[in-house]
Image (cartoon, rainbow, N blue to C red):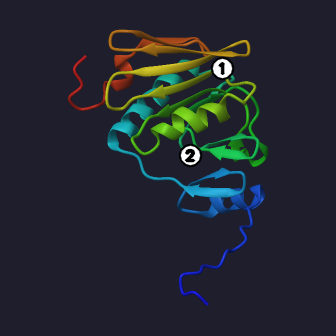
C-alpha cells in the first residue's frame, strides 16, 4: 500500500437544530451553510466603533416603532444558511425562542479584509433571496465609503455614498451625514 494514500471520510452535515443548540451553548460563534459550520473571527476596533455607531443611530431613530435593531450576536436565516450580520433591522416577529431573524428589512456588514469578498459575493446573493429585505449595506472601515444595495420591486440597484454625502436608509426613513458613522474613529478628519 502506498504511504501517500489517504482515506476519504464521508461528511455528515450538521442539522439546523444541532447547529442552533451548539450556538446557544458555545463560546465561539459559527455561521452555518447547508450543514457545514464556519467559525467566525474577531473584529478590529475600527469595525466595532463603526458598527456601534450605526447601531446607536438606528436604535435612536427607531425607538417607539415596531422595528428592532440587532447587533452581531443575532443570526439571520435564509433557507439553510445562518449568518451573523454586523447590524440588522427587523420589523416582524422573531423566530421561536428568539434565536434568529428571518425577515430583516435592513442588513449592514462592515467590510474587513478577511470577509470583504464573502460580504460582496456570497452574502449579497443569499441576502437578496430574503423577501422582506429592502437594503443591504456595505460599510468600508478603511475610508469613508458606504454602498447600499436597494430593492426596487424585484431589481436591486446600488447607491454609493462618500464624504460629505447624506446617507439615506430609505427602508427605515433615516437620513444622516455619512461622517456620523465614522466619527468615533481616531484620526477621522470630517
Earlier in the chain: of badge 2 and badge 1, it is: 2
Q: Quadrant of the C terminus?
A: top left
- What residue is shown at x 75% (from left), y 55% (from top)? 16
Give the residue number, with chain letter if any, for mark 1.
134
Query: Which element type, helix, strand or loop, lies under badge 1?
Result: loop
Q: Where is residue 135 in the image (x, y as percent from the top left)?
A: 60, 21
At label 1, counting other C-alpha atoms closer than 10 Å, the crowd grade (few under 14, some 14-19, many 20 or more) is: many
- What residue is shown at x 68% (from left), y 15% (from top)? 155
* Placement of 41 over or under 129, stated as above or below: below
* Real-space CA distance between mark 2 and mark 1, rounded to the nearest whole angstrom: 21 Å
Q: Is residue 168 left or right of residue 9?
A: left
Badge nearest the viewer, 2 or 1 = 1
Give residue 122's quadrant in the image.
Answer: top right
| Viewer-nearest residue: 103 or 97 | 103
Query: Which element type, helix, strand or loop, lies under badge 2?
Result: loop
At label 2, counting other C-alpha atoms closer than 10 Å, the crowd grade (few under 14, some 14-19, many 20 or more) is: some
Instruction: Decide if residue 86 is in sight here.
Output: no
Instruction: Decide if residue 184 is in sight here.
Output: yes
Q: Quadrant of the N terminus?
A: bottom right
* Placement of 80 over or under 106, stated as above or below: below
Give the residue number, with chain letter if any, for mark 2.
73
Q: Residue 145 carries which label?
A: none
Amino acid at each position: 500500500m502506498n504511504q501517500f494514500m489517504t482515506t476519504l471520510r464521508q461528511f455528515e452535515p450538521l442539522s439546523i437544530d444541532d447547529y442552533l443548540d451548539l450556538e446557544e451553548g458555545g463560546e465561539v460563534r459559527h455561521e452555518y451553510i447547508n450543514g457545514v459550520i464556519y467559525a467566525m473571527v474577531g473584529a478590529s476596533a475600527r469595525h466595532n466603533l463603526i458598527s456601534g455607531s450605526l447601531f446607536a443611530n438606528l436604535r435612536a431613530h427607531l425607538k417607539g416603532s415596531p422595528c428592532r435593531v440587532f447587533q452581531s450576536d443575532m443570526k439571520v436565516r435564509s433557507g439553510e444558511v445562518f449568518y451573523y450580520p454586523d447590524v440588522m433591522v427587523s420589523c416582524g416577529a422573531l423566530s421561536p425562542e428568539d434565536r434568529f431573524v428571518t425577515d430583516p428589512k435592513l442588513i449592514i456588514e462592515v467590510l474587513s479584509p478577511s470577509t470583504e469578498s464573502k460580504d460582496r459575493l456570497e452574502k449579497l446573493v443569499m441576502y437578496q433571496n430574503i423577501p422582506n429585505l429592502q437594503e443591504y449595506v456595505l460599510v468600508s472601515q478603511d475610508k469613508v465609503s458606504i454602498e447600499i444595495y436597494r430593492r426596487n420591486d424585484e431589481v436591486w440597484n446600488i447607491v454609493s455614498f462618500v464624504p460629505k454625502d447624506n446617507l439615506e436608509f430609505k427602508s427605515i426613513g433615516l437620513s444622516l451625514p455619512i461622517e456620523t458613522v465614522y466619527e468615533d474613529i481616531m484620526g477621522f478628519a470630517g
